[in-house]
Each structure stands twice: as structure tokens, then as C-alpha cells.
Image (cartoon, rainbow, N blue to C red):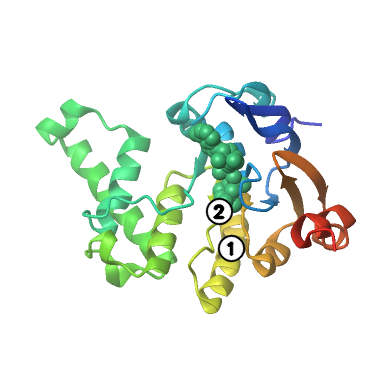
Amino acid sequence: MSAPLLHIDALCMRFGGLLAVDNVAFTLQEGEIFAIIGPNGAGKTTVFNCISGFYRPSSGRIDLEGQSIAGLGSHTVATHGLVRTFQNVRLFKNMTALENLLVAQHRHLRTSLLAGLFKTRAYQKSEQDAIDTAMQWLDYMGLREFANRAAGNLAYGHQRRLEIARCMITRPRLLMLDEPAAGLNPQEKLDLQGLIQRLRQEHKVTVLLIEHDMSLVMGVSERILVMEHGKPIALGTPEAIRNDERVIKAYLGDE
Ligand SMILES: Nc1ncnc2c1ncn2[C@@H]1O[C@H](COP(=O)(O)OP(=O)(O)OP(=O)(O)O)[C@@H](O)[C@H]1O
Ligand SMILES: [Mg+2]
């Protein structure tokens, strides 16, 4: 059997006296949609920061298909096909939607600087390809009409989708979404659920999701990890998680 796409084991992240991630372990199979849930401050985003190379974990393993990627740094991790969105939208707000998608591709393609300076034919062709690909992604996300609008002036739900497009345009293997439904209205949340499923189906991407919206989490995930105070307290199917005593207690308190 081949190694799983991602294998996390005994992951710990300490900030001074605080153990923000305490012995977290899970495995992601290729093509899976997997969610991490838990109360505020549980350590979910810190797990993302470790996987995506923004933090070097204090200890533990993060393996991509059997190879350690822990502590490699965010740029290197991204070149391995692991990309993420942030809890707060991070776009180039003064650039247009189209330009945001061009920048993402340039970072990915790393077209040579000299080719750019001399505007070689190959360079012009790759520029046109980049624009075509960007427009295809804007179409896919229902954002074509906003191609030339500054990203910062898009409706919030559109900014969220543009951010996902910016990830997808690099053709990632793992898409990590940190609270993608935050700030969305009920219809946008439903659309997001459909989008996540289509991305997996049509673009063969594995999805790791942090989300507080339970109907989205339960509707889209195959498996769910629940964290509380840095610790994993349950891992299972939506059905199992919904009926787990510890999970109910973590969310509702002791009464
Ligand atoms: N860079 C940091 N330095 C110090 N403490 C941090 C740092 N990042 C996170 N923490 C702390 O680690 C704990 C876990 O934070 P984290 O952001 O991972 O939680 P979360 O589960 O994503 O919460 P939320 O649902 O509110 O986003 C919190 O107590 C937080 O204050
Ligand atoms: Mg968070």
C-alpha cells in the first residue's frame, strides 16, 4: 500500500508556557475531505501553521507521502503542493482579481526574469496562457465579471472565493481552508459546500478544512478531528462525532 498523502503524528507546538498543540495525530488519504473542529483557541490554526510551514513544530512528525516536511518553510511546502487560505482573507487588495491570479501563477511558474525583461516570444506565450488560466478560474468561481475590479472592492464572499481560486491555480494536491465559511450568508455557505465537493471531484484535490459552521462540516467532511485545549479529543465520521459524549461536552459544557 502506498503512503498516505499526509501523516501527522505526535505533533506538538509550544508557545512559552502554552502547549497550543498537544500530541495531535491524523492521516489524510488522497481525495479525502477532512475537517478539524473545536472551540476557539483549541489549536486548529496552529496545526495549519505547522503543516503549511509557517511554524516549525516543537516536536512530532509531518510527512507528505512518507517524506518529512516539518520545518521546511512555507514557500518550500507550497512547492510540494500544499496550499492554504487564511482565517482572515489575505489578497492583494489594490490589485484586480485577475492580477491576484497572475501573481499566484508567477510565483508558481517562476518564469525567468531575463525572459520577462526581453519579452521573448516564449514569455509572451506564457503570459497569455497565464491570463487564460486565470480567466478560466474566475469563470469557475463565478467571478469573471469582476476580473478587473480591485480585490479589496469585491463583496466579502467573492473575496473568499478569489482566495480559493488563488490556491487552486497552483494545482495543489492539498487545499487547506481555514474557516472558509466565516462571514458568509446561508446561501453562500451552501454554494461553498458545493464548491468544495466540485474541487475534489473535478480537480482531484484533497481538502483539509477548519470550520465552525456545523452544517457545512457535517455536510462535506468524510472524517472529522475534534480538538480542545490543544488536544485531539475525538476522530471519526460526522455521525460518530455528532454522538460523541466528549465532543458534546466540549461544545455545550458540563450541564
Ligand atoms: N504565534 C503565537 N504565539 C503565542 N500564542 C499563540 C500563537 N498562535 C496561537 N497562539 C495561542 O495558541 C492557542 C491556539 O490558537 P489557534 O489560533 O491555533 O486556535 P484556533 O483553534 O484556530 O482558534 P479559533 O477558532 O479562534 O481560530 C491560543 O491560545 C492562541 O492564543
Ligand atoms: Mg483559528
Q: Which of marks 1 and 2 is nearer the N terminus?
A: 1
> Would the CB of label 1 be found within 8 Å of ligand 2?
no
Whether residue 205 can be seen here:
no
Residue contact between numbered discs 1 and 2, judged by CB atoms under 8 Å? yes
Taking 29 as reference, is 149 above or below it?
below
The crowd level at tag 2 (other Cα within 10 Å; few <14, some 14-19, many 20+) is some
Q: Is mark 1 on a helix, strand or loop?
A: helix
User: Is residue 27 found left or right of 157 in the rendered image?
Assistant: right
Total marks in image: 2
Residue 182 or residue 7, whichever sits in front:
182
Residue 21's quadrant in the figure? top right
Q: Quadrant of the N terminus?
A: top right
Q: Position of residue 108 (x, y in %)?
A: 37, 37
Between the C-alphas of marks 1 and 2, the distance is 8 Å
Q: Position of residue 34 (x, y in %)?
A: 69, 50
Whether residue 217 can be seen here:
yes
Q: Where is residue 79 in the image (x, y as percent from the top left)?
A: 46, 31
User: Is residue 32 found left or right of 168 in the rendered image?
Assistant: right
Q: On the image, numbered disc 2 is attached to which residue?
A: 203
Image point (62%, 52%), residue name: 40
Taking 9 as reference, is 217 above or below it?
below
Residue 134's quadrant in the figure? bottom left
